[in-house]
Image (spheres, rainbow, N blue to C red):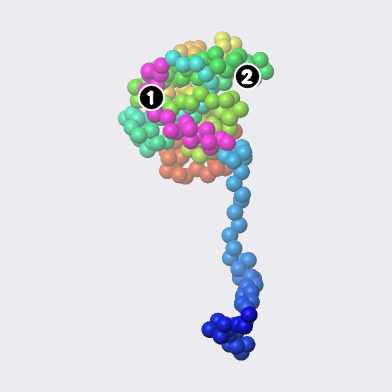
């Protein structure tokens, strides 16, 4: 069949097929300016801790003086909203920066014979202990404290506590030790030193000088100076590590 002259193209008018464009090679300046990112690993320990932290922070704060009964162990954060001058920089109804972060684990965890976490009341018991400590303190009111709490698997609780303490540097975790202490027992009360927290906020029966005669290595004046320095951003990570080592 002869070619249709309407659809034929002389050889000299035919277009050559396109060729691959030349890609410019990366120059040294490109490599010098290129950013380098660490690949996100959702199973990284810190990221696992942050996921628990985010879930905790999504919870509505509750009054510490009226936490309903509950089962479970987990993590919690206490917040201050009162008029105490020392804590004015973090006092807030919005509960933005915790004054203390802690965890509650089932009984027997340290000895390897932990009770069933579903039937444990460790978290509620721990918050009750904190409420009692604040109620006994001569210059604090439990009505000025709020709490967020989260029942969680124990292995992730420790990760979240570490991440939150490093992130927020809560004052009762970082520069004033002893808020979370229990009665050490009669023998240790006679021989041990009062915790810095009890020198700063006296009132707990077991740390009274009549029951625990030896004063803390950190007098309340030093604790107040450290609190102000922490809130003003004057303490470096090295300072905080040194303070914690000194109090332990």
Residue located at (42% from left, 30% from top): 59
Taking depth in this image into account, of 17 and 110 the one nearest to the observer is 17
User: Does 60 sit left or right of 216 as displayed?
Assistant: left
Q: In the picture shown, does residue 25 fall above or below 114?
A: below
Residue 69 in view in this figure: yes
For the C terminus, give its image quadrant.
Answer: top right
User: Which element is circle 2 on?
Assistant: loop
Residue on which the image places disc 2: 109
**What's the magenta bit mostly, secondary-structure-wise?**
helix
Residue located at (50% from left, 34% from top): 53
Q: Residue 62 carries which label?
A: 1
Residue located at (43% from left, 40% from top): 231
Taking depth in this image into account, of 89 and 228 the one nearest to the observer is 89
Taking depth in this image into account, of 133 and 36 the one nearest to the observer is 36
- Magenta segment boundaries in residue numbering: 48-68
User: Which element is circle 1 on?
Assistant: strand
- The 10 Å Cα crowd at callout 2, few under 14, some 14 to 19, many 20 or more, is few
Is residue 190 found inside the magenta-colored segment of the image?
A: no
| Residue 83 in picture, x, y percent from top left | 32, 30
| Residue 145 in picture, x, y percent from top left | 38, 25
| Residue 155 in picture, x, y percent from top left | 61, 27
């Amino acid at each position: 069949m002869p070619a249709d002259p309407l659809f034929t193209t002389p050889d000299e008018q035919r277009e050559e097929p396109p060729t691959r464009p030349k890609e410019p090679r990366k120059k040294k300046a490109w490599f010098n300016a290129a950013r380098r990112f660490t690949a996100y690993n959702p199973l990284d320990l810190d990221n696992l801790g942050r996921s628990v932290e985010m879930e905790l922070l999504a919870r509505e704060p509750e009054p510490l003086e009226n936490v309903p009964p509950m089962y479970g162990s987990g993590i919690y954060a206490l917040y201050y909203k009162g008029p105490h001058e020392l804590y004015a920089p973090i006092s807030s109804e919005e509960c933005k920066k915790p004054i203390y972060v802690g965890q509650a684990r089932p009984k027997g965890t340290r000895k390897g014979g932990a009770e069933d976490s579903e039937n444990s009341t460790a978290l509620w018991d721990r918050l009750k202990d904190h409420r009692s400590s604040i109620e006994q303190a001569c210059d604090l009111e439990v009505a000025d404290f709020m709490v967020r709490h989260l029942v969680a698997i124990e292995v992730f609780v420790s990760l979240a506590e570490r991440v939150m303490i490093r992130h927020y540097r809560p004052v009762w975790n970082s520069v004033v030790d002893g808020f979370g202490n229990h009665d050490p027992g009669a023998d240790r009360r006679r021989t041990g030193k009062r915790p810095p927290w009890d020198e700063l906020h006296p009132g707990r029966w077991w740390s009274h000088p009549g029951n625990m005669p030896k004063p803390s290595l950190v007098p309340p004046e030093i604790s107040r100076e450290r609190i102000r320095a922490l809130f003003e951003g004057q303490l470096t990570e090295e300072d905080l590590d040194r303070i914690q080592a000194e109090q332990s």
